[in-house]
Image (cartoon, rainbow, N blue to C red):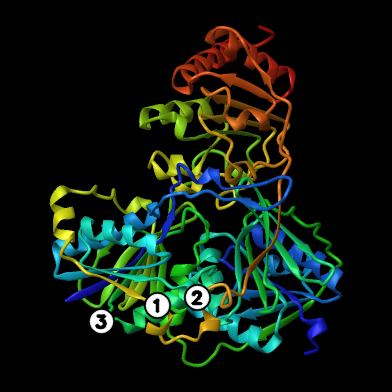
């Protein structure tokens, strides 16, 4: 039976994320308690796994690293149809950059008996880096295909996928086990169903901390992160804005005249 | 090698024989950093390209060009490339590696960083050396900018999009040393690109466009988005987008402007139904005139533009298109 690990990140709710701001005076972050939600692109990754499971025998394991509150996000994935959940949660894991995150996730994946495929969203909405999937592949010694927009063949030991490149696509064949990072083009994620929520109550979430993983403390979290935020600043992108008044027709005409006068139209 | 002479590297990638423009821009920056550090700027070229392109790398300031060549490099080969680059880096010990934020670079960079057990910063919008000669890698975040550094591990690796740094001057008198690197024995790729299918790029490339129309979540629907597309066509402008519009599925990721997307340098920028998020706005450099159309008079976008129109774009854009078309029919002062 095919075993797919879907890596999921709990991120601050995007609609509220602009509440975290750099204070122009203190140059520190203003913090608010923002609820955690599943990283949008990870929903596409989970959906891709669920679609595969509709057509062949497969089990889907959700893997997430985060504070205990990230358990809700794992639970939501189980309600959407994943079979098992693993939450990596330990104060020692806090403050991890992409490198330390990928290393910690790889240590958890090594503990899972059988893994044929690892799915990640293309990027995270909060950090906007795209490194966890490929770095995970290196730590696990697996190949990786990034920016997958279509799974063409998912039977057997050699999968065929389409991935994005500049002005086009590439058709790629890769040997399993492999890591894939997935774009939003791949599918439209399903929404929660009542029966899914009921079924998920019987599903198990395992929590692993530092002592459950074969990794020294100085290789995880902030200590294990090669990169740090060394300073922060505000940018002054202010322009003095003239608001054009009038009826809609007048506004359009005035705008066009001003652009012509400025020599840009 | 003396650590103080550790070079600054640029990876010259290629797909189907063409080195993308961002690699030359990065080489310009690497040459600058190299001068400041008193170290050479070096290029690692993956595969074979025309002699003219190799000459251009020297003219742009490459002191050394390492060329690794065997068939397959032209087909998006990151698994083998990352092994070769990290192997060479173990030997030469560069202090900085710059990689373009192209699709290939974005797959290659994390593979190289993980193999070298070092840090990697995504899509920097500036690179600055501190007094201690550590590379500050600036990225937008939280409505401002943050500097990421990699204080201990080496090399320091960053990806940068096209258009962040200017094209360097190509000096025909600049020369350098070409070093052929042996292909390592016995490397097999488990990932095979069977085919590369290129679509004809539509319209003006964003990075080169003199007029850019960018749309955001305010378009409201695919139909609303269609109007923004028509506005762009009417103005002979390149069409850009924000992440929410891409996430809605209205438009391809490749049109996204901003830190993790494209950098644009238009004369005229028109932002439609977008709020002026930093991630997007840092992608627009040096526009002569910036216009925003948004139905919320309090939207932060109005503080970052020259001309503002407070209207629901779904109503206003069709009117603007109509007026523009009338204007084109009867040229001259209206």
Q: Is disc 2 in contact with disc 1, using a CB cutoff of under 8 Å?
A: yes
Chain at numbered mark 3: A
Sequence order check, earlier mark of 2 and 3: 2
Q: Secondary structure at mark 1?
A: loop
At 46% from the left and 85% from the top, the residue drawn is: A215
At 69% from the left and 78% from the top, the residue drawn is: B152
Mark 2: give few (<14), some (14-19) or many (20+) Cα within 10 Å.
Answer: some
At 20% from the left and 74% from the top, the residue drawn is: A2
Q: Does residue B31 appear left or right of residue B203 in this picture?
A: right
Mark 3: give few (<14), some (14-19) or many (20+) Cα within 10 Å.
Answer: some
- For label 2, the residue is A92
Among the 4 quarters of the image, the one containing residue B182: bottom right
Sequence order check, earlier mark of 3 and 1: 3
Same chain for labels 2 and 1? Say yes or no. Answer: yes
In the rendering, at what x and y percent does residue A157 appear? 25, 78
- Residue A265 can be seen in this image: no
In the rendering, at what x and y percent does residue A177 appear? 31, 78
Calculate the distance from the C-alpha at mark 3 to the C-alpha at mark 1.
Answer: 21 Å
In the rendering, at what x and y percent does residue B69 appear? 58, 80
Same chain for labels 3 and 1? Say yes or no. Answer: yes
Among the 4 quarters of the image, the one containing residue B292: top right
- For label 1, the residue is A209
Q: Does residue B101 appear left or right of residue B126 in this picture?
A: left
In the rendering, at what x and y percent does residue A18 appear? 54, 43
Calculate the distance from the C-alpha at mark 2 to the C-alpha at mark 1.
Answer: 8 Å
Disc number placed over residue A114 in the picture, else none:
3
Disc number placed over residue B249 in the picture, else none:
none
> The C terminus of chain A appears in which quarter of the rendering?
top right
Q: Nearer the viewer, mark 3 or mark 1?
A: 1
At 66% from the left and 35% from the top, the residue drawn is: B210
Calculate the distance from the C-alpha at mark 2 to the C-alpha at mark 3.
Answer: 27 Å
- Against B147, residue B12 (above or below) is below
């Amino acid at each position: 039976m095919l075993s797919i690990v879907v890596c999921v990140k709990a991120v601050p709710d995007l609609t509220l994320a602009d509440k975290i701001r750099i204070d122009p005076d203190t140059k520190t972050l203003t913090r608010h308690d923002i609820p955690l939600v599943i990283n949008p692109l990870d929903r596409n990754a989970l959906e891709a796994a669920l679609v595969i499971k509709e057509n062949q025998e497969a089990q889907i394991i959700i893997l997430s690293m985060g504070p205990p509150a990230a358990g809700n996000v794992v639970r939501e994935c189980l309600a959407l149809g994943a079979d098992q959940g693993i939450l990596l949660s330990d104060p020692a894991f806090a403050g991890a950059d992409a490198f330390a995150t990928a290393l910690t996730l790889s240590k958890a994946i090594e503990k899972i008996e059988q893994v044929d495929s690892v799915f990640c969203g293309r990027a995270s909405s909060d950090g906007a880096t795209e490194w966890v999937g490929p770095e995970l592949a290196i730590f696990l010694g697996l190949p990786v295909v990034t920016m997958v927009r279509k799974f063409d063949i998912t039977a057997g030991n050699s999968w065929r996928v389409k991935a994005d490149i500049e002005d086009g696509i590439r058709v790629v064949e890769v040997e399993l086990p492999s890591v894939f990072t997935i774009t939003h083009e791949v599918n439209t994620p399903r929404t929660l169903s009542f029966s899914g929520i009921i079924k998920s109550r019987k599903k198990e979430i395992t929590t692993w901390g530092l002592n459950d993983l074969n990794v020294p403390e100085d290789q995880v979290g902030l200590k294990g992160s090669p990169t740090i935020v060394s300073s922060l600043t505000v940018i002054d992108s202010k322009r003095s804005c003239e608001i054009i008044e009038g009826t809609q027709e007048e506004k359009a005409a005035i705008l066009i005249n001003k652009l012509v006068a400025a020599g840009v139209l | 090698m003396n650590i103080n002479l550790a070079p600054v590297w640029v990876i010259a990638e290629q797909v189907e024989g063409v080195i993308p423009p961002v690699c030359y821009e990065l080489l310009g920056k690497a040459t600058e950093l190299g001068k400041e550090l008193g170290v050479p700027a070096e290029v690692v070229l993956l595969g074979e390209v025309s002699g003219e392109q190799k000459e251009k790398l020297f003219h742009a300031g490459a002191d050394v060009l390492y060329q690794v060549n065997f068939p397959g490099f032209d087909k998006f080969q990151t698994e083998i490339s990352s092994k070769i680059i990290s192997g060479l880096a173990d030997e030469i010990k560069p202090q900085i590696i710059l990689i373009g934020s192209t699709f290939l670079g974005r797959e290659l960079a994390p593979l190289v960083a993980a193999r070298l057990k070092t840090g990697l910063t995504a899509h920097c919008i500036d690179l600055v050396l501190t007094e201690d000669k550590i590379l500050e890698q600036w990225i937008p975040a939280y409505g401002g900018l943050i500097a990421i550094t990699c204080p201990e591990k080496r090399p320091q690796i960053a990806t940068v999009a096209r258009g962040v740094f200017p094209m360097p001057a190509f000096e025909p008198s600049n020369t350098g040393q070409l070093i052929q690197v042996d292909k390592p024995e016995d490397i097999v790729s488990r990932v095979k690109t069977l085919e590369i299918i290129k679509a004809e790029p539509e319209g003006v490339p964003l990075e080169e466009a003199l007029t850019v129309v960018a749309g955001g979540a305010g378009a409201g629907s695919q139909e609303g988005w269609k109007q923004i597309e028509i506005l762009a066509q009417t103005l002979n402008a390149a069409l850009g987008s924000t992440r929410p519009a891409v996430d809605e599925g209205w438009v391809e990721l490749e049109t996204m402007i901003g830190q993790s997307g494209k950098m644009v340098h238009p004369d005229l920028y028109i932002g439609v139904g977008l709020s002026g998020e930093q991630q997007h706005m840092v992608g627009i450099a040096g526009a002569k005139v910036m216009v925003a159309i948004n139905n919320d008079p309090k939207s932060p976008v109005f503080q970052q533009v020259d001309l503002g129109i407070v209207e629901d774009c779904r109503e206003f854009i069709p009117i603007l298109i109509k007026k523009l078309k009338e204007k084109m029919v009867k040229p001259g002062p209206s």
